[in-house]
Image (cartoon, helix red, strand yellow):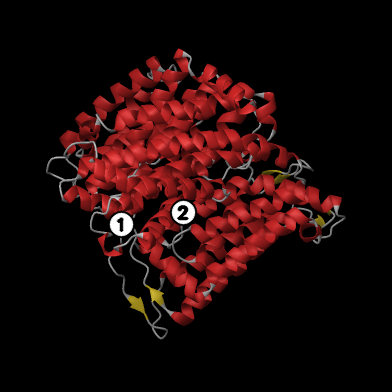
């Protein structure tokens, strides 16, 4: 795990209405809590001496939601570091690569899923060198097939389209 | 002596060709992921779980344990040579270790780190062996209320130890607990919040969650904040520290082993605290504290011993109480349950060869690690020169294959993508994911124990306070939280994490 310091972010004062990190953080948690409350609403609560399935999810979600709102409110009053823009490129290519792997592993096998996911994922950085990425993906896939399929005997489909 | 006969049983198990080989593989992989910044033992062990299905449980655990403590050794190599902590526990080592490297004393720093870790590892092994039996007896006296309170203490501990805001860490714990409630209710069999997805009726799987957050979200974070690698260009120098340096290092190693080992036992990932505590202590005890941060060998020796001792004693809560103190240990629980072993006090009596074999293997592993790390250091340095643009697609493919193979499930792959997104959002919003993971890990067990206690007490929460052991544990948790929130301590805490 690495800890690189993010360059000192701008701070918002109490008067400005820019989205600070903690406002977004608090609202995000409140949203998650609301979703869980909605999902758990119909579960029987039971009583303390014989808890039903709904007791804990509802109480934890309530605490989380209240905490999230407190965090957001405190940040709204105090200000704080501004939320920085997300790394959309990284998200798109990394998540896309994983999903492509999922789509292709059963239908085509590792021999297609591996290179496609890796090459797609490689574009997550602007430093990508396409030719190098393709060669590397092919070599790594071959290595993975040898290692996982033959050396370790995992039942992973290698060629599924034939 | 029981201890000796137990240890000899352990060595008998660990010294088979297969187990030595597995221990070696574990230590190699551990060193590898320790050296490489951006891949940690959590993602690695999650990725390798499917490989262990075919092994016998003892061999599997020996290998996985090797990865975990091997990563502690590898992490210091990167800290010293590149000024980046390869592992979170090596943060402190960058301070003086990298300075030593810049002065041409990299070899001495590496040598002291490895030998100090080895010593700490040996002591911790004996400590686990000695403490295992009494603690197991103690654990058998624990009722549900005590278990619950102990876990509360662990969670409080993990929030105090997380970097950044304690309040936000606390919210992460609750998020983890909430995620843990998804799935079939243990007592009534009713499905909870499964959204009609069949796989969720067993609850959220730990491996996709851990891999999403510690594997993929971490990659996106690293791509966003590329780190400056400051690989030491000069010679590493001779690997053996001089006699004077050894003499200087002995007391810090002893103290570091003691502090790290003690903190490691605490549930809630006390092991992370060890190196910080040791560094602070050495600085306080030093005749000339100004040397610290400029290449003081004590600043490498103490924390390195502490992190290795802590990494090993972290097995104690798992093996004796069945409570995993951190995410790696939670994966160990997974590995054990796959083989039908339920972690807890009964492991030692029911599976003595597993228990003692694993402990003995730690000693063997530590000896191997000195060899893996010192003479082979050149190889690891070369590896550090592989650019990240090649490293992350490789991590990606390994993780994908690993996660698919655990259940041969495509859905797990999609879940991992979902948790990667969640993890990235949380990191972006300034949350520390570790407390969430611990909350998730302990959630199911906590709910079970809470409900059992309340049935026994007829719905009265006083039971947690009235029962003496439980009351003390809760009091410790509250005191810790209050102390950490005191403004003066809070500032110091920030300073520690910023160093």
State yes or no: discs 1 and 2 in contact (Cβ < 8 Å).
no
Residue of label 1: A4
Query: In the image shown, does B143 or A36 lie closer to the viewer?
Result: B143
Name the element at disc 1.
loop
Q: Single out the residue that lies furthest toward the left.
A: B234
Label tally: 2
Q: Is residue B277 above or below residue B184?
A: below
Residue B411 in the image: x percent, y percent?
51, 35
Q: Quadrant of residue B74?
A: top left
Q: Single out the residue that lies furthest toward the right.
A: B458
* Chain for numbered disc 2: B
- Work out how far the residue at label 1 is from the one at label 2, CA to CA, in angstroms: 20 Å
Residue B23 in the image: x percent, y percent?
43, 24
Is residue A138 visible in the rendered image? The answer is yes
Q: Single out the residue that lies furthest toward the bottom.
A: A15
Q: Quadrant of residue A110?
A: top left
* Rendered residue at 52%/20% (across/down): B11
Residue of label 2: B273
Residue B150 in the image: x percent, y percent?
67, 51
Is residue B34 visible in the rendered image? The answer is no
* Rendered residue at 24%/29% (across/down): B375
Frontmost of labels 1 and 2 is 2
Q: Relative to residue B157, is residue A75 drawn left or right?
A: left
Query: In the image shown, does B67 or A157 lie closer to the viewer?
Result: B67
Q: Relative to residue B17, is residue B100 drawn left or right?
A: left
Q: Is residue B103 above or below residue B346?
A: below
* Chain for numbered disc 1: A
Q: Residues within 10 Å of mark 2 (few under 14, many from 20)?
A: many
Query: In the image shown, does A160 or B200 lie closer to the viewer?
Result: B200
Name the element at disc 2.
helix
Query: Does label 2 lie on the same chain as label 1?
Result: no
């Amino acid at each position: 795990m690495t800890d690189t310091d993010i360059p000192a972010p701008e701070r918002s004062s109490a008067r400005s209405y820019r989205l600070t990190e903690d406002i977004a953080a608090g609202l995000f948690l409140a949203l998650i809590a609301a979703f869980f409350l909605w999902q758990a609403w119909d579960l029987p609560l039971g009583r303390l001496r014989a808890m039903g399935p709904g007791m804990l999810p509802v109480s934890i979600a309530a605490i989380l939601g209240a905490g999230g709102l407190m965090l957001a409110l405190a940040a709204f009053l105090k200000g704080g570091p501004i939320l920085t823009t997300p790394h959309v490129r990284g998200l798109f290519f990394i998540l896309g690569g994983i999903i492509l792997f999922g789509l292709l592993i059963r239908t085509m096998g590792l021999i297609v899923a591996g290179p496609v996911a890796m090459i797609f994922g490689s574009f997550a950085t602007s430093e990508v060198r396409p030719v190098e990425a393709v060669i590397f993906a092919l070599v790594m896939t071959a290595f993975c097939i040898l290692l996982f399929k033959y050396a370790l005997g995992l039942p992973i489909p290698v060629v599924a389209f034939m | 002596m029981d201890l000796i006969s137990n240890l000899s049983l352990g060595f008998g198990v660990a010294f088979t060709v297969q187990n030595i080989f597995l221990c070696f593989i574990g230590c190699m992989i551990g060193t590898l992921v320790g050296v490489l910044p951006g891949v940690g033992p959590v993602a690695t062990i999650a990725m390798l779980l499917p490989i262990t299905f075919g092994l016998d449980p003892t061999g599997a655990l020996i290998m996985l344990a090797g990865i975990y403590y091997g990563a502690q050794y590898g992490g210091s190599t990167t800290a010293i040579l590149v000024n980046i902590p390869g592992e979170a526990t090596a943060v402190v080592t960058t301070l003086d270790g990298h300075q030593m490297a810049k002065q041409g004393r990299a070899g001495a720093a590496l040598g002291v780190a490895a030998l100090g870790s080895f010593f700490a590892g040996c002591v911790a092994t004996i400590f686990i062996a000695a403490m295992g039996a009494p603690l197991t007896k103690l654990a058998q006296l624990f009722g549900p209320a005590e278990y619950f309170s102990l876990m509360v203490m662990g969670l409080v501990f993990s929030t105090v130890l997380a970097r950044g805001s304690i309040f936000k860490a606390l919210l992460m714990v609750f998020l983890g607990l909430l995620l843990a409630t998804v799935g079939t209710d243990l007592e009534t069999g009713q499905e909870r919040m499964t959204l009609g997805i069949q796989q969720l009726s067993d609850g959220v799987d730990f491996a996709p969650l851990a891999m999403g957050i510690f594997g993929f979200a971490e990659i996106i974070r690293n791509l966003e904040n590329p780190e400056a690698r400051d690989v030491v260009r000069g010679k590493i120098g001779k690997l053996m520290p001089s006699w004077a340096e050894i003499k200087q290092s002995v007391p810090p190693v002893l103290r570091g082993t003691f502090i790290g080992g003690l903190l490691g036992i605490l549930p809630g990932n006390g092991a992370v605290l060890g190196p910080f505590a040791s560094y602070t202590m050495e600085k306080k005890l030093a005749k000339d504290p100004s040397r610290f941060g400029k290449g003081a060998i004590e600043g490498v020796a103490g924390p390195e011993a502490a992190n290795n001792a802590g990494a090993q004693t972290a097995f104690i809560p798992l093996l004796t109480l069945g409570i995993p103190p951190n995410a790696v240990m939670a994966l160990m629980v997974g590995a054990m349950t796959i083989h039908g072993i339920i972690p807890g006090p009964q492991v030692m009596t029911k599976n003595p060869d597993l228990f003692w074999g694993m402990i003995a293997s730690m000693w063997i592993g530590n000896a191997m690690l000195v060899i893996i790390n010192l003479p082979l250091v050149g190889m690891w340095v070369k590896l550090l020169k592989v650019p990240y643009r090649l490293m992350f697609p490789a991590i990606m493919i390994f993780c994908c294959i690993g996660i698919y193979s655990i259940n041969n499930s495509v859905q797990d792959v999609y879940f991992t993508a979902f948790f990667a997104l969640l993890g990235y959002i949380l990191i972006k919003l300034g949350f520390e994911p570790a407390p969430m993971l611990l909350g998730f890990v302990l959630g199911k067990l906590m709910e079970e124990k809470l409900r059992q206690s309340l049935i026994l007490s007829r719905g009265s929460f006083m039971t947690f306070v009235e029962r003496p052991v439980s009351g003390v544990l809760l009091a410790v948790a509250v005191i810790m939280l209050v102390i950490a929130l005191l403004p003066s301590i809070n500032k110091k805490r920030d300073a520690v994490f910023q160093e």
